[in-house]
Amino acid sequence: MIVDYLIVSSLYDFSTDLVVQELEKRKSRYVRLNRENFESYRLTLDVNDASLEVKMSGASYRITADLKAVYYRQPVFLRNTQGETLSIDEQLSRSQWMGFLRSLAIFDEARWMNPLDATYRAETKAYQLLTASKLGFKIPMTLIGNDFVRLKEIERKIIIKSLDTVLLRDSNDCLFAYSTVESSSELTDENVSTVPLTVQEYVTPKIDVRVTVIGGKLTAVKITSFGQGIAEDWRLTSRNAVEYTEIKLPQYIEHQCVKLLEALDLNFGAIDLIESNGNYYFIELNPTGEWGWLVSDDRRFDVEIATWLVDEK
Amino acid sequence: MSGHILIKHAKRKPYSKIPEMPEDAVYDDKKGYWISGADPLVSPGSKYGALVTKKCDQETGEDQKGE
């Protein structure tokens, strides 16, 4: 089968299930590749022909230069913080499949959500913060580094964040780093110098706002608990105690969000804003941000993404 | 290194390589999504609905960067 739509995802990316079901309803010709299953596929990238052949479960798929769109959900292939000794086979597998994924860049005539290079660039928080600032967004004072003397220039309460996702293995446990409120007086050379971190001004009071932008269409949801803003990282609050309420943003903020995606060459973005005393601050943008948790009968991001992929208006 | 402030504040939980899945869930390569019986496992109206993604988000960093 000649494929019009290529989905690159992972096996347990359930949001992608929703998009694929929409493509199926529209009788689109698609194939989904999951990173966990690459070894079970038989793949051939024919560079001269600019095509990819996929053999999977007895079926054969052919992706050509006429490919219409790619839904690319892989900001990284596999994290490099594996926390366990890898066999040489596993090391080889990770490095070479990542290279294979990057090679999909040959399908540069297709519409990408999101383009490979744009995804990787937009993953850099410092870059997205500065880009947002240039477009007129307020951003919190932000310092990145391992010099505790400089980091303490942001006084009193601060937000501590990692530069990249921290998901670490420690024996049978894993550790995940959320944004944390801390006192700047707690920063010392001993607890900072070995690894750089991001320190931000703590904007308070705050209400978190998630802005999902799909092909220039914007939906904003405020995140509260019992009607109030959540002081710390809202993901630490019990799901049953969190409300998501769709809101209308000021027009200039909507405009800045759309412009930000344009500046970063992204067709999808999940933007985190903070509203504080009527001011909106840009916090961060995730080019492969999650959206399935916001889907409802009235908010069908899955339909919007499928519609964008097949270029239906 | 273990004294780093990012480690100090990181949340610890038991490691699980794959999420807990319903017993009858099967991934269909040709369809490109999980099914349960004859129906999609995940759909906005299903018992194992779209909200399940929130659990995965919280466990993997909310941006498909988990391993």
Image: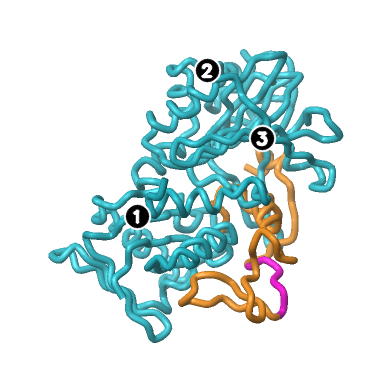
Chain colours: A cyan, B orange
Quarter of the image with the N terminus of chain A is bottom left
Q: Tell me the element at label 2.
A: helix
> Which residues fall within the magenta stretch?
B18-23
Q: Amino acid at mark 1?
A: Ala
Coordinates of residue A294 in the picture (x, y in percent): 66, 46
Inter-mark Cα distance, 1 to 3: 28 Å
Which residue has dot 3 on it? Answer: A221
Q: Is residue A175 visible?
A: no
Taking the image as shown, residue B52 lies to the left or right of residue B67, namely: right
Instruction: Say whether residue A55 is magenta.
Output: no
Q: Which residue is mark 2?
A: A252
Badge 2 and badge 1 in a common chain:
yes
What amino acid type should be assigned to the residue bearing mark 2? Answer: Tyr
Q: Earlier in the sequence, mark 2 or mark 3?
A: 3
Q: Residue furthest front?
A: A313
User: Circle 1 sits in a helix, a strand or a loop, which is it?
Assistant: strand
Can marks 2 and 3 be said to lie on one chain?
yes
Sort mark 1 into few (<14), some (14-19) or many (20+) by Cα contacts within 10 Å.
many
Kindly identify which residue carries mark 1.
Answer: A69
Kindly state the secondary structure of the residue where label 3 is placed: strand
Q: In the image as oriented, which residue stretches furthest toward the bottom?
A: A58
Q: Amino acid at mark 3?
A: Val
Dominant secondary structure of the magenta stretch?
loop
Q: Circles 2 and 3: CB distance less than 8 Å? A: no
Q: Nearer the viewer, residue A144 or A250?
A: A250
In this figure, what is the number of numbered marks? 3
Query: Which of the two discs, 2 and 1, labels the residue nearer the N terminus?
Result: 1
Q: Nearer the viewer, residue A123 or A264?
A: A264
Residue B21 shown in magenta:
yes
Compared to residue A49, the image places residue B11 above or below, namely: above
Q: Residue furthest left?
A: A48
Quadrant of residue B22 within the rendered picture = bottom right
